[in-house]
Image (tube, grey):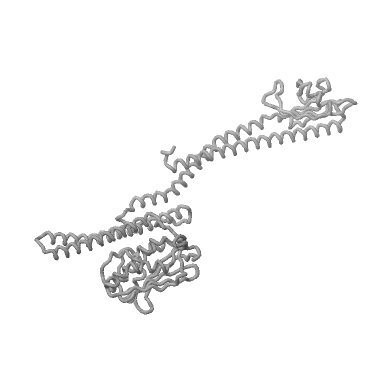
């Protein structure tokens, strides 16, 4: 069944349902028409019995041979009438030589005061008859008036109706099935159009989308949803392509420099100072490659899922002093300084290792691209804390803020050269992993200002070191 085309499967289901419906409707019509015809016959029998009783009472009773039990028109229409005594003897009959129309058991029921309406076969008569028997008082005794009407015309009508249903039903089923097939084909034509277009879409055809039907139905919404998905996939592929291209470019430069240094060192005998300078240059490029590899690994992990974060309550002032101490010597060699300005009561709920990594990247950027004093500060705003790293350099160029956190994005034309262009993107990854955000701006006194906004923690939740009891006793 699964190998049959969908339009044929839909047509088969529709045809089967229509066959069941048509059969049920035909059966209902057949039974209803048969019931109505039989009700009409019963009403005719009751009316005939009432008329016969009127004739009997008006024209002299059962002893008068001129009293008509049925009209001549009804007699020609195969309507029979009899008057029977309690023993089953025929007292009057509409037809000469007519045998009793009811059985002795029925006669006993009627003489007991009941009216009987039944369907039965009459001796010597064709088809089935509808028989109506009722008690009549005559001459101090109870006799039975019986009228019988043939059901041949009713059966003939039902047979003709059955023939018409047997002919019209399959024709209606065929027409309905063809209409269902056409409707399924017209509906699935939109799906086929989307399938053909989907087969044409590849990496070499960017911007190609599925056709969206004009109707606002499920297929139109499906096509729109798939087009949105294609747009997201294209953006993701383009992002990965640029990432691979930029990473290849970034790796090529230090590798080329490293290879050049090694080739020059091996080309001819060199002095100790020359060999040392070559090795130092090679070590510097190797360090750059190492940092680049670590940054790329971190970004790859974040692309695969959320960056793992181990949250704890961190006193921001202590963290800023720790980061400042790490870079103090390097800043001193460049005749620059790092200043910390933070309220000791400011606490954030963060991973201290990741946060220190982000701040280290910001200080690294400030040392490489900025100038003047570097300031580390933190301010609390309600449930949030902003940590700022500022310098007194040339700052960011106009329009750079929109792409500052893109991978391999640089502002080299204003802030010098060097670096991999991943520092700020990693800061943004760490901030978003904490549920916060990062941003760039211009310091009021000039220079660059990069900040991280995180969730504020509680100072009373910070674990305080326990006093050394032995030292206190001594």
Task: Name the residue located 87 percent from the left edge and 29 percent from the top edge.
Answer: 60
Please identify the residue farthest to the bottom as the structure is shown.
Answer: 445
Task: Name the residue located 71 percent from the left edge and 23 percent from the top edge.
Answer: 122
Please say if 232 is above or below 9.
below
Task: Name the residue located 66 percent from the left edge and 31 percent from the top edge.
Answer: 153
Please say if 141 is above or below 241.
above
- Residue 144 position, x and y percent, is 82, 26
Looking at the image, can residue 440 be seen? no
**Left or right of residue 65: residue 397:** left
Q: Tally the numbered discs.
A: 0
- Dividing the picture into quadrants, the one containing residue 131 is top right
Please identify the residue farthest to the front as the structure is shown.
Answer: 474
- Dividing the picture into quadrants, the one containing residue 430 is bottom left
- Residue 423 position, x and y percent, is 33, 65
Please identify the residue farthest to the left as the structure is shown.
Answer: 268
- Residue 431 position, x and y percent, is 40, 63
- Dividing the picture into quadrants, the one containing residue 339 is bottom left
Quadrant occupied by the C terminus:
bottom left
Please identify the residue farthest to the right as the structure is shown.
Answer: 140
Foreground: 34 or 473? Answer: 473
């Amino acid at each position: 069944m699964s190998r049959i085309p969908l339009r044929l499967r839909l047509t088969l289901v529709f045809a089967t349902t229509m066959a069941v419906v048509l059969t049920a409707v035909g059966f209902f019509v057949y039974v209803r028409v048969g019931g109505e015809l039989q009700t009409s016959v019963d009403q005719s029998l009751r009316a005939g019995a009432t008329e016969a009783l009127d004739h009997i009472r008006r024209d002299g009773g059962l002893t008068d041979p001129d009293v008509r039990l049925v009209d001549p028109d009804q007699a020609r229409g195969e309507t029979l009438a009899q008057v029977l005594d309690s023993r089953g003897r025929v007292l009057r009959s509409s037809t000469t030589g007519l045998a009793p129309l009811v059985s002795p058991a029925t006669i006993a029921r009627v003489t007991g005061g009941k009216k009987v309406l039944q369907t039965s076969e009459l001796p010597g008569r064709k088809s089935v008859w509808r028989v109506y028997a009722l008690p009549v008082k005559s001459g101090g005794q109870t006799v039975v008036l019986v009228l019988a009407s043939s059901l041949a015309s009713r059966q003939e009508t039902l047979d003709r109706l059955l023939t018409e249903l047997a002919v019209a039903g399959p024709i209606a089923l065929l027409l309905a099935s063809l209409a269902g097939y056409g409707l399924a084909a017209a509906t699935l034509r939109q799906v086929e159009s989307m399938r053909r277009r989907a087969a044409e879409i590849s990496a070499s055809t960017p911007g190609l989308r599925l056709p969206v039907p004009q109707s606002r139905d499920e297929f139109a919404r499906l096509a729109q949803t798939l087009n949105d998905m294609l747009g997201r996939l294209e953006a993701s592929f383009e992002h990965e392509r640029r990432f691979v291209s930029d990473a290849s470019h970034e790796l090529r430069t230090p590798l080329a420099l490293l290879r050049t240094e090694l080739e020059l060192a091996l080309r001819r005998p060199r002095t100790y100072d020359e060999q040392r300078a070559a090795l130092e240059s090679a070590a510097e490029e190797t360090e750059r490659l190492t940092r680049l590899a670590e940054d790329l690994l971190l970004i790859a992990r974040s692309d695969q899922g959320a960056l793992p974060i181990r949250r704890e309550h961190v006193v921001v002032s202590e963290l800023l002093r720790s980061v400042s101490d790490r870079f103090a010597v390097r800043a001193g060699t460049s005749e620059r300084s790092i200043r910390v300005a933070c309220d000791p009561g400011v606490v954030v709920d963060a991973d201290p290792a990741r946060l220190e990594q982000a701040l280290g990247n910001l200080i690294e950027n400030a040392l490489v691209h900025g100038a003047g004093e570097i300031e580390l500060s933190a301010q609390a705003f309600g449930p949030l804390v902003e940590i700022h790293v500022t310098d007194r350099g040339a700052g960011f160029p106009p329009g750079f803020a929109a792409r500052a956190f893109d991978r391999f994005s640089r502002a080299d034309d204003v802030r010098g050269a060097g670096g991999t262009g991943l520092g700020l993107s990693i800061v943004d990854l760490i901030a978003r992993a904490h549920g916060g955000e990062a941003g760039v701006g211009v310091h009021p006194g000039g220079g660059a200002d990069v900040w991280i906004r995180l969730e504020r923690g509680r100072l009373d939740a910070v674990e305080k070191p326990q006093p050394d009891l032995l030292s206190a006793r001594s």
